[in-house]
Amino acid sequence: MSDDCVFCGIVAGDLPSVKVAEDETTLAFMDIHPASDGHLLVIPKRHSQDLFDIPADDLTAVTLAAQRIAKVAAEEFGADGVNLLNCCGSAAWQSVFHFHLHVIPRYRTKSRDSLTLPWKPNVPGDKNHLTHLGNRLANALN
C-alpha cells in the first residue's frame, strides 16, 4: 500500500467507491469520471505504479478480471463493444499512479458514450519508418 495513493485508499476502505467486483488480488469499481455508461476500473490490490512496475501475476489477475467484467458489462448494458485501456506515464494520460485497466463499454448512441479516438486509425504510416522501428524493437527484444 502507498499512503498517498487514492486507489490504495479505496482498497483499504478509507475512501469511497462504487465497488463492482472483488477477489483476493483485484478490485473493480466505477470510474468517477466516466467516458461512457458503465465505465469502470480494475486494479490490483497490491500497489504498482504502472505497467512497467506491476508483477506478472497481478497483471494477469487484473487482465482476467477485466475480461470477465467486460463480457458481463457489455451484455448487461447492451454495449456495442468494449475498450480496455491502460495509460502508462503522464505523457500517456496516466493521472493516478496505481496500475489500472479502464473497462469502457462502447455505444453507437453518443448520449451514452463521449469517448473519441485520439488518432485516425485508417491513415497509413510511412512504410520505411514502420520497418525501421519494427526492426529496432525486434532487435532489442532479442
Image (cartoon, rainbow, N blue to C red):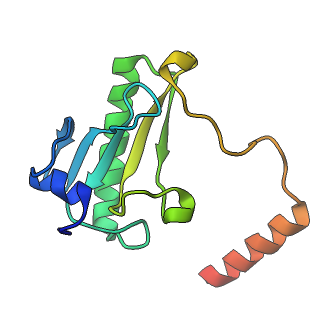
The structure residue drawn at horizontal position 66% and vertical position 44%, both measured from the top left corner, is 118
- Screen quadrant of the N terminus: bottom left
Please state which of residues 140 and 113 is positioned toward the viewer in this rendering.
113
Give the percent coordinates (x, y) of residue 85: 48, 48
Where residue 136 sits, quadrant-wise, is bottom right
- Screen quadrant of the C terminus: bottom right
Give the percent coordinates (x, y) of residue 61: 28, 55
Q: Check the image and name the residue furthest to the front.
A: 4
Give the percent coordinates (x, y) of residue 117: 65, 39
Where residue 33 sits, quadrant-wise, is top left
The structure residue drawn at horizontal position 15% and vertical position 48%, both measured from the top left corner, is 15
Please state which of residues 88 and 82 is positioned toward the viewer in this rendering.
88
Please state which of residues 123 and 114 is positioned toward the viewer in this rendering.
114
Please state which of residues 63 and 8 is positioned toward the viewer in this rendering.
8
Q: In this rendering, is residue 48 above or below 75?
A: below
Q: In this rendering, is residue 19 above or below 76?
A: below
Give the percent coordinates (x, y) of residue 131: 83, 69
Q: Is residue 22 left or right of residue 104?
A: left
The structure residue drawn at horizontal position 25% and vertical position 56%, both measured from the top left corner, is 6
